[in-house]
Image (cartoon, rainbow, N blue to C red):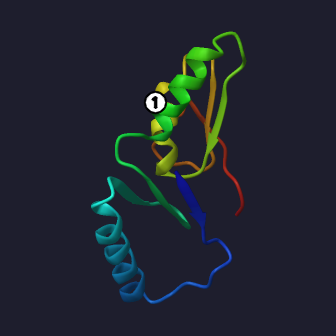
Amino acid sequence: MCNLRFAKLQPKPVIFKTLGYLFLRRLVSSLGLQVLEGDKVVEVKNIEVNKGIATFRFISKNPEDLHLSIGDDWTDEDTFSVMSDEALAIKVRDSASKAKSWIRWGR
């Protein structure tokens, strides 16, 4: 999985952003990859794998550990959906989420 953050880049006109994503999607689709757009992030991942599957595998191998997941956009929802009732799943903003808790960050 590749997770690219663009937080420091200046906003570009929407048309260039849209064309870039369309090109990237077309480029990777034949490779069995998927492009996900998040908040200041573009995630390129295997179409058969997501953060939830990886998290579930980790939790299954380490059931006695404290499990904590903190995320700030919709690309983290797969992870939140597999967290147990005893785990801490926190969304960093006040929007609808599968996380059990949220905190407001910034302004």
Identify the amino acid type marked 1.
Ser
As drawn, 73 above or below 61: below
User: Looking at the picture, how far across and down is residue 93, in whole percent?
Assistant: 59, 50
User: Looking at the picture, how far across and down is residue 39, in whole percent?
Assistant: 53, 63
Which residue is at the front of the view, 58 or 80?
Answer: 58
As drawn, 13 above or below 27: below
Q: How many marks?
A: 1
At x 52% / y 33%, what residue is drawn?
A: 54
User: Looking at the picture, how far across and down is residue 87, in whole percent?
Assistant: 63, 21
* Horizontal side of residue 29 vs 104, given as left or right: left
Looking at the rendered structure, the secondary structure element under dot 1 is helix
User: Looking at the picture, how far across and down is residue 19, in whole percent?
Assistant: 34, 83
At x 53% / y 34%, what residue is drawn?
A: 99
At x 36% / y 87%, what residue is drawn?
A: 15
Quarter of the image holding residue 71? top right
Quarter of the image where the C terminus is located:
bottom right
Number of other residues with Cα within 10 Å of mark 1, as a class: few under 14, some 14 to 19, many 20 or more: some
* Horizontal side of residue 75 vs 64, given as left or right: left
Farthest front residue? 31
Which residue is labeled 1 in the image? 81
As drawn, 49 above or below 105: above
Which residue is at the front of the view, 59 or 78?
Answer: 59
Quarter of the image holding residue 67? top right
* Horizontal side of residue 97 vs 60, given as left or right: left
Let me know if residue 28 appears in the view: yes
At x 72% / y 19%, what residue is drawn?
A: 66
Which residue is at the front of the view, 18 or 61?
Answer: 61
Let me know if residue 98 appears in the view: no
